[in-house]
């Protein structure tokens, strides 16, 4: 039974304390060994989602390799783990996971995370083995043609993280809607006192030195700043696996850091640079917006969607093309000189991000995953 509060969001324990909904998670990232590498991006989002679904009373089972099993038990203790063991390519592991999941009770939903070509056999096996009456695909990247056609063929409902991704599934005829946002949005909020207007901290957050993350544009723009502005600015580059040392002492390279430290660092910043050539959502730009930072961005669709007032966005400046270092430099100079403009854009960006891009697991479960909490015998 759906209970809604005045806000329209579900309040309390939607399932009355029972573990009624049964969900199987097939995520290809969890089927690959990841030992020794930091967990970030989509993986953090998925771990947070699994934990929060368990806290809502959903019986969640995750098929995963042994290293991920340890992470899931630690980060989402309410979830069940279906260990796969060994090391196989995802193309074989997905099928093995579906066969192993068939040995227990049927599920209500199979939640498939961001399918690439390797997950196609597992998706088909899950449907042929009738693991659940419903399949939901979580799409976080631009897909190739085959995953979109398979999603339609197995009757999956698709949840995309942006219009850029959604349009590919729609063209294939798969029912698709957009719902996504930053998990742990409450960690990101503006500095509680006005910052010193003399020093301007600029920040680029990405997996560096990724060739398409705009590092070259950020450095070129910074080097083009007028001397009077340049002396007041510091460029913070976050984050490198191995931070390089720059000759310019006003350029600071940071190592990879946990989410809580990213939130603290952003509260010490004044302007966020979002200069990627390709993104399918970009948690970094939303984190900056939630922190109340004005954004200078390249004109890729997911940035425009968030910053363009005509698309119900706002809070930043979009330059004309992805290599427009001169325009980025001019935008930095303009914002560095105008504290009032920085505050106004930052406040608008925070309003947009809170309204549109902060993730809500209760809403996802109530509207998409288990909209009426109907358990059906899939056998």
Image (spheres, grey):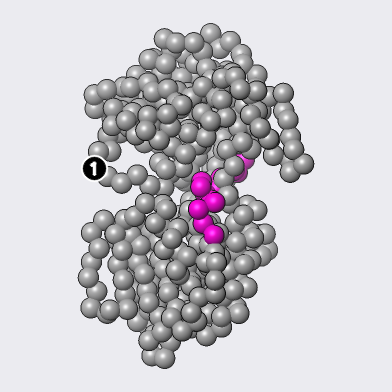
Indicate the position of residue 97 as horizontal and vertical percent values.
37, 20
Which one is in front, 43 or 15?
15
**Would you place residue 304 above or below residue 129 in this image?**
below
Q: Residue lying farthest right?
A: 6
In the picture shown, does residue 80 fall above or below 195? above
The answer to whether residue 109 is visible is no
Q: Residue at x 24, y 27 (%)?
A: 87
The residue identified by callout 1 is 36
Q: Residue at x 41, y 9 (%)?
A: 103
Magenta stretch: give its range: 175-189
Indicate left or right for 191 with 214 as reference: right
- The image quadrant where one finds the N terminus is top right
Image coordinates for residue 282, horizontal then vertical, percent: 48, 54
Residue 349 in percent (x, y) is at 60, 64
The residue sitting at 43% across, 37% down in the picture is 47
Q: Residue furthest bottom?
A: 228
- Percent coordinates x, y for residue 151 in the rendering: 52, 30
Q: Residues within 10 Å of mark 1 (few under 14, many from 20)?
A: few
Residue 6, relative to residue 265: is it above or below?
above
Number of marks in picture: 1
Residue 177 is a magenta residue:
yes
What type of secondary structure mainly makes up the magenta span?
loop
Q: Is residue 15 magenta?
A: no
Front-most of 125 and 338? Answer: 338
Q: In the depicted view, which residue is nearer to us: 282 or 347?
A: 347
Left or right: where 299 falls relative to 247:
right
- Residue sitting at 46 percent across and 45 percent down? 141
Please give left or right for residue 253 compared with residue 203 in the image: left
Query: Would residue 50 be seen by someone viewing this image from the given angle?
Result: yes
Is disc 1 placed on a helix, strand or loop? loop
Where on the picture, by quarter, is residue 173? top right
Q: Quadrant of residue 307?
A: bottom right
């Amino acid at each position: 039974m759906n209970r809604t509060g005045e806000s329209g969001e579900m309040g309390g324990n939607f399932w009355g304390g029972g573990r009624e909904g049964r969900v199987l998670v097939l995520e290809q990232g969890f089927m690959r060994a990841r030992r020794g590498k930091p967990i970030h991006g989509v993986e953090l989002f998925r771990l947070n989602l699994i934990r929060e679904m368990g806290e809502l009373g959903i019986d969640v089972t995750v098929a995963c390799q042994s290293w991920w099993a340890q992470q899931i038990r630690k980060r989402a203790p309410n979830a069940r783990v279906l260990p796969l063991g060994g090391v196989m390519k995802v193309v074989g592991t997905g099928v093995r996971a579906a066969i192993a999941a068939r040995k227990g009770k049927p599920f209500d939903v199979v939640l498939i995370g961001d399918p690439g070509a390797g997950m196609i056999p597992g998706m088909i096996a899950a449907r042929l083995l009738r693991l659940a009456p419903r399949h939901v695909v979580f799409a976080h990247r631009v897909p190739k043609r085959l995953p979109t056609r398979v999603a339609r063929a197995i009757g999956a409902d698709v949840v995309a993280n942006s219009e850029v991704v959604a349009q590919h599934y729609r063209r294939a005829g798969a029912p698709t809607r957009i719902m996504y946002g930053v998990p742990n949005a409450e960690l990101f909020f503006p500095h509680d006192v006005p910052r010193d207007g003399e020093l301007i901290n600029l920040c680029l957050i990405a997996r560096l030195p990724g060739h398409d993350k705009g590092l070259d544009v950020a450095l070129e723009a910074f080097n083009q700043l007028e001397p009077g502005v340049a002396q007041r600015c510091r460029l913070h580059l976050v984050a490198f696996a191995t931070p390089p040392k720059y000759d310019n002492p006003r350029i600071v390279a940071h190592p990879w850091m946990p989410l809580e430290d990213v939130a603290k660092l952003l509260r010490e910043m004044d302007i966020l640079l979002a200069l990627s050539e390709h993104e399918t959502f970009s948690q970094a730009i939303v984190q900056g917006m939630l922190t109340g930072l004005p954004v200078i961005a390249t004109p890729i669709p997911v940035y425009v969607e968030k910053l363009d007032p005509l698309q119900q966005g706002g809070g930043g400046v979009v330059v004309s093309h992805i290599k427009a270092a001169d325009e980025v430099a001019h935008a930095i100079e303009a914002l560095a000189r105008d504290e009032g403009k920085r505050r106004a854009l930052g406040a608008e960006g925070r309003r947009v991000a809170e309204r549109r891009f902060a993730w809500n697991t209760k809403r996802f479960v109530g509207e998409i995953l288990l909209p009426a909490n109907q358990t059906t015998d899939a056998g």
